[in-house]
Image (cartoon, helix red, strand yellow):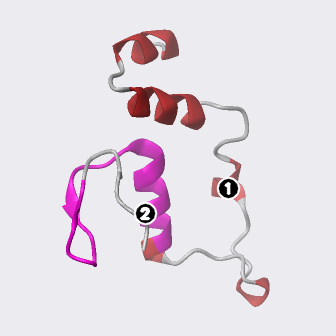
Amino acid sequence: MQETELLSQASPETDKARLLAASSPHSGDWLHAAPIVSIGLRLSDEGTRIAVAHRLGCRARICVCGKTVDARGLHGVH
């Protein structure tokens, strides 16, 4: 499916915004960053999981604070 088809079928506006952001030039550059621990350039496994989930969209889940996070990740990040 092409990007224009995805955008035309995306609903609501938050899904369109996520698709546009993920397809923007250089939006995935963070995936190529070298994990240099000595200067703080390393995401934990949990941080990586959350970053990927926000980028791609994820299924509903329960946050560590006990509140529900919907599939669009619409809940305050803790």
Distance, label 1 to label 2, CA atoms, is 14 Å
Which of pointers 1 and 2 indicates the residue nearer the eye? 2
Residue 4 visible in the snapshot: yes
Instruction: Give the residue pinned by disc 2.
Output: 50
Establish if 19 lies above or below 49. Answer: above
Badge 1 marks a residue whose secondary structure is helix
Establish if 22 lies above or below 2. Answer: below
Q: Quadrant of residue 42?
A: bottom right
Which residue shows up at 42% across the image and 43% down it? Answer: 56
Question: Residue 57, image x and y in percent?
Answer: 37, 44
Q: Residue 51 in magenta?
A: yes
Which residue shows up at 42% across the image and 10% down it? Answer: 5
Establish if 74 lies above or below 35. Answer: above
Looking at the image, which is closer to me, 13 or 61?
13
Instruction: Give the residue pinned by disc 1.
Output: 30
Q: Residue 59 in magenta?
A: yes
